[in-house]
Structures are given as structure tokens and as C-alpha cells.
Image (cartoon, rainbow, N blue to C red):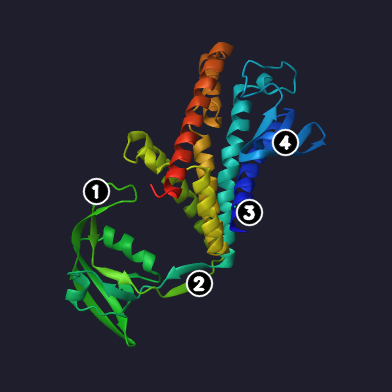
Amino acid sequence: MSFLVSLLVFSFLIFFHELGHFLAARAMNVKVLVFSIGFGKKLLSKQIGDTQWSISAIPLGGYVQMKGQDDSDPTKVSHDDDSYNTKSPMQRIFILVAGPFANFLLAFMLYLAMTDIGIPKPLPIIGEFSKESPALLAGMQKGDKIVQINSTPIKYWDEIGPLIKASGPTMRFVVQRENKLYDITLSSKVINDKNLFGEPIQRKIVGIIASGDLTTVHYGFMDSIKYAWDKTIWATTFIFESVKKLITGVVGLDQVGGVITIVDVTAKASSMGLLTLLGFAALISVNLGVLNLLPIPALDGGHIMFNLYEMITKKAPSLEAMYRFTIAGWMILFSLMFIGLFNDINRLMGG
């Protein structure tokens, strides 16, 4: 059941991406010949108006085939008024950007839906202390509730870290203990740590660990909008940074995951509840949006680069150059897919 849910989620994310292209193309009066979820042999197909809507056998993506535009052979063009290649570079860029934009919009909507369900947040209650904890040495105790840091009120545990990072070496905590408030001044210490990408960093700590007590937060309308916006920006920044680390070699190719990993993690997320599934789906949606903006021929980003070149030089790239770059783009994509699949199989076999 979890596998089916993960497949449906992935297909829905692809559908939303392609729907962005489809709606933008129709807005620019471009005829859409095929709207397909998946590649390869068509399992289900229905002609509606000018468009053939299909579900294909290989659920690894999808595509919208517009009149005068074919990634499998970029030399196939049409000079009709309703053709993609007769539109201006700016109109084509609008169509191309619409797919990734749809993914970012979907992520925003998913995060917004999470606020309607309620976001679980850890309360600022101390559960444990690290070794040689400055907080413990200063007199804090297990079960203390942190209510204030340097005159800033604290409601949730995730507010503590940024305040410690932004503060000087000496901080003033107000904690609640058995209905009494205690004013505690302590000095933080700096430790050597690693970030999410395994890079060595220095981090300021006071040596406290959350108790794990949770509360469910329900946001008002404007706060929900802000939460969804902030989470979408965070996810976008995280994915861009991940791609940057991969390109620069900070993150090794052995960390690249393929479709098996995506399906597996989505299945696990679905088993952990609707809220976790929505959050993971939003992250994958942003991932699809970011990756499609990469300047690789055969991806939206590659086509955007071609059109920017035409806007700047007032001259379209030659069909020969388009063909060669597109073949190179497909080679890059298939190489990345092969690496991801190899890593997936390696992980499944315990490698």
C-alpha cells in the first residue's frame, strides 16, 4: 500500500509540473499534441481536443509535447502560428518556467495544507544535558522550561538555537521551575561539528537537549501564509545548496539517489502519517522544480539558456548545435539516472 501511495504522489508531482507547461503553452496559443505521465508504451490514452492525454508504462517522469518542439529530435520544427518555435524567446521562456514554477507553487500549497492540520512543535523544556554542559554548570535542571533568552520570549524549542547563535558569549536565561521563575546567566562554548553536508563547522552551544514534549500549533491565515512561504524558501535554498555541493565535490556521487530511493522514502513518509507525507512531497516538488531549472540541454533550464542566447544575440542557435547539445544533455541525464540506480541497488544490497 505504501508503494502505491508513493507512486501516486510522485506521479501527481510530475502531473503538476507538466500542467504548468500545458497551461502556459495554451495561454501563448501553442498547440499541445501530447500530455503524458510516464514514458514509453502508452497504457491509457484519450484524445481531448487537440491533446492526447496518456499514462505510459515507465513512471519516471512525464512530458508535454508541443507542436514544433520535440526533445528527441530538436530539428523537427513547425512554422505554423500555433507552433512553439514560432513564438518569441520571451514567450517560450514563459512556457518553460511555468513547469518549475508549478512545482514551487505546489510545495507552497502543501505546506499551507500542513498548517491546517496543525504543526507539531517541541516545547522549550530541558530533557537532558550534554557532557560538560554550560547550562548544567550554571544551575539549570532537567524539566526546566525556558521562557526567555536575553529578553526575547520563547514559545518553542526551535527558537532557542538561532538566539544562541546570534547572541554573544554570555547569555541571560529565564527558566520556569515548579511555577517559579529563575534568572540564570551563563557562557556558551564553541564546539567542532559537521553540517548537513558533512563539512566541518564550529557551533555555539549551551549543552541542553529537548525533552521531546510536543504541542500542536494551528496558525491563523497570515501566519499560515508566512509559514508556507518560509518553508518553500528554505526547501528551495536547501536543494540549490545541495546541487552546489554535489557539483563542487563536497557531496560525493555515492550520495545521489534514484527513483528507487525516492519511492522508498516516500513510502516510509506515508507510513508516518499525512503530515510527514505532505512535508516530504513538498520537498520533492521543490527538488523537481530546482533540477529542471539546471542549464542542462533537454531540461527546462537548457531550453531557457537557448532562448536567452537568442534574445541576446538576436539569432537562434543552429539546428545542428541544438541537436548536439540536446544529445549531450540526454547523456548527462542518463548518466545521473544510472548513478542513482546503481546507488539504490547498492544500498538495497547492503553496500
| Amino acid on which disc 4 is placed | Lys
Badge 4 or badge 3: first in the primary sequence? 3
Which residue lies at the image location 42% right of the left edge and 48% below the top edge?
A: 347
| Amino acid on which disc 3 is placed | Leu
Quarter that holds the N terminus: bottom right
| Amino acid on which disc 2 is placed | Thr
Image position, residue 207 (x, y; %): 24, 68
Which residue lies at the image location 37% right of the left edge and 68% below the top edge?
A: 157
Image position, residue 340 (x, y; %): 46, 39
Tag 4 near tag 3, CB within 8 Å: no
Badge 2 or badge 3: first in the primary sequence? 3
Q: CA distance from mark 4 to mark 1?
A: 49 Å
Q: CA distance from mark 2 to mark 4?
A: 45 Å
- Which numbered dot is residue 42? 4
Q: Secondary structure at mark 2?
A: strand
Q: Which residue matches tag 3?
A: 4
Work out whether residue 222 can be spotted. no
Q: Which residue matches tag 2?
A: 216
Image position, residue 160 (x, y; %): 33, 66
Q: CA distance from mark 2 to mark 3?
A: 29 Å
**Callout 4: few (<14), some (14-19), or many (20+) C-alpha neighbours within 10 Å?**
some
Q: Which residue matches tag 1?
A: 200
Q: How many marks?
A: 4
Which residue lies at the image location 51% right of the left edge and 30% below the top edge?
A: 334
**Callout 3: few (<14), some (14-19), or many (20+) C-alpha neighbours within 10 Å?**
few
Which residue lies at the image location 77% right of the left edge and 33% below the top edge?
A: 51
Q: CA distance from mark 1 to mark 2?
A: 34 Å
Of tags 4 and 1, which is closer to the observer?
4
Of tags 2 and 4, which is closer to the observer?
4
Tell me: residue 322, above or below residue 266. above
